[in-house]
Amino acid sequence: MATTETIINDKREIFGWAMYDWANSAFSTTVGTVFLAPYVASLARSAAEAAGTTTVPFFGIPVAPDSFLPYCISFSVLLQVLFLPILGAIADYSHLRKLMMQIFAIAGAFATIAMFSITADLWWLGGVLFILANLAFGASVVFYNAYLPDIASEDQRDRVSSYGWAMGYLGDFILLALNLAFYTFHDKLGIPTGLAIRINLASAGVWWLTFSLFTWARLHPRHARRHLPEGETYFSIGFKQLFNTFREIGHFPETIKYLLAYFLYNDGIQTVIAVASTFAAAPIISGGVELSTETLTAVILLIQFVAFLGALFWGKLAEWVGAKRSIIISLVIWSGVVIYAYFGLKGESRALEFTLLGVVIALVLGGSQAISRSLFAQMIPKGREAEFYSFYEVSDRGTSWTGPLIFGLANQWFGSLRYGILALIFYFIVGLILLPFVNVPKAKEDAKRYSAEHPTS
């Protein structure tokens, strides 16, 4: 049953909403950051070696093994560019936001569970399942984010958004700790390494599906389902509404400016998340030391715990200095980290440097994303949340595409992932330059004025 729109700042519902971050973040970390990329890259390298080549064929295209997953990330986001805006428009018109969130969450969870089937002969299946799971992940997060303005008042959104991110990192930490313990002792349990990794991958899907039940139980629909006009389908209505949004996008110049800045700096953030494990695990041509999966997972486990604390801190920082200033502070830190990563992370001290950089990143990781999400919630018209958040999600967690694509091309052309870091430096610096020019008060006023002039039923 739909509820009235007056229910807001309800602790029970906010907890249920935040539990979806707890549930789905396991996919981002266990699959997207830690286990899948190194595992699939190693299987692809073995396939290339068995064939006596340096590349593997994927639909007839020769691909460098370490470039395969970055290419798949890019392709999955190109699919999101095509589908998420129309899905957001359908959700806003139909008032089926919760149902659509459930459908895509279930689809993504089952695609993740199916990663248990990735074996040496089916190394390419890792890319196919990731594309499907990541597409479903992005779609479900569109509807999840769109609930933020409904469940939290304007003065509480920074805190609630940070709370959601913190819950996500706490859930990540717990599952990753369990996975790390299992992976560390898998030999003593008589379980082969490949099977242990496949079990860990599938566990993220089980986690995602199980804890989503808390969200379904506590998150309420906000409107009664809207019936279709005669001769229309939700798909046709969605296209019409999306076309209308593009036609009237000029009403939100500051929101567009913010999205441009966000697209750039968040593409950098998402690229760090997506390629960190591949970059750390791959030997650097100039004498680098390869990091073991155990070391890599332990470092990322530390990052999850620090990020949990960092997300909560950044919620407070936004209260003290304002949302936009807190994001700018985080971007200054991000810029310093990627510049150091380009010139450092070499030789025998590489593991220690990677750990220290990981801790610094963790302090700003959740906070920069949480406050960005809540700030955007102030800039969008009422009743069009899912549609606007679909554009936002195109470059949100695990869905950036230009950065992973550049990393993949850099590795294939130059034989090293290090040159891809130059793109990260560009993303953070340019985003840092653009963000101060966003007039947040005007963006809020534009959204409120449009909502008053174009009320939704």
Image (cartoon, rainbow, N blue to C red):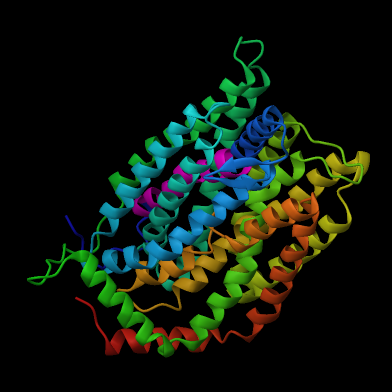
The correct choice, above or below, for 264 with respect to 406 in the image is below
Q: Measured along the vertical axis of the image, is residue 361 above or below residue 191?
A: below
The residue lying toward the viewer, choosing from 136 and 98, is 136
Side of 133 where 321 appears, left or right: right
| 327 relative to 133 in the view: left or right | right
The reply to whether residue 18 is visible in this rendering is: no
* Camera-nearest residue between 53 and 73: 53
- Does the magenta-highlighted stretch encompass residue 173? no
Name the main secondary structure of what is drawn in magenta: helix
* Residue 275 locus on image (x, y percent): 67, 49
* Residue at 45% from the left image edge and 69% from the top image edge: 391
The answer to whether residue 310 is visible is: yes
Quarter holding the N terminus? bottom left
Residue 322 x %, y %: 60, 75
Residue 28 counted in the magenta span: yes
The quadrant where residue 435 appears? bottom right
Foreground: 40 or 352?
Answer: 40
Q: What residue is rendered at 50% in x and 81% in y?
A: 256
- Counting from the top left corner in percent of width and height, residue 385 is at 36, 70
Seen at 47% across and 27% down, the residue is: 117
Please state the total of marks drawn on the protein image.
0
Q: Is residue 373 above or below residue 207?
A: below
Res 363 → quadrant: bottom right
Which region is colored magenta? 12-33
Q: Is residue 299 above or below residue 262?
A: above
Q: Position of residue 25 (x, y in %)?
A: 51, 45
Tell me which residue sits at (79%, 58%) in the image: 419
Q: In the figure, is residue 449 to the left or right of 203?
A: left
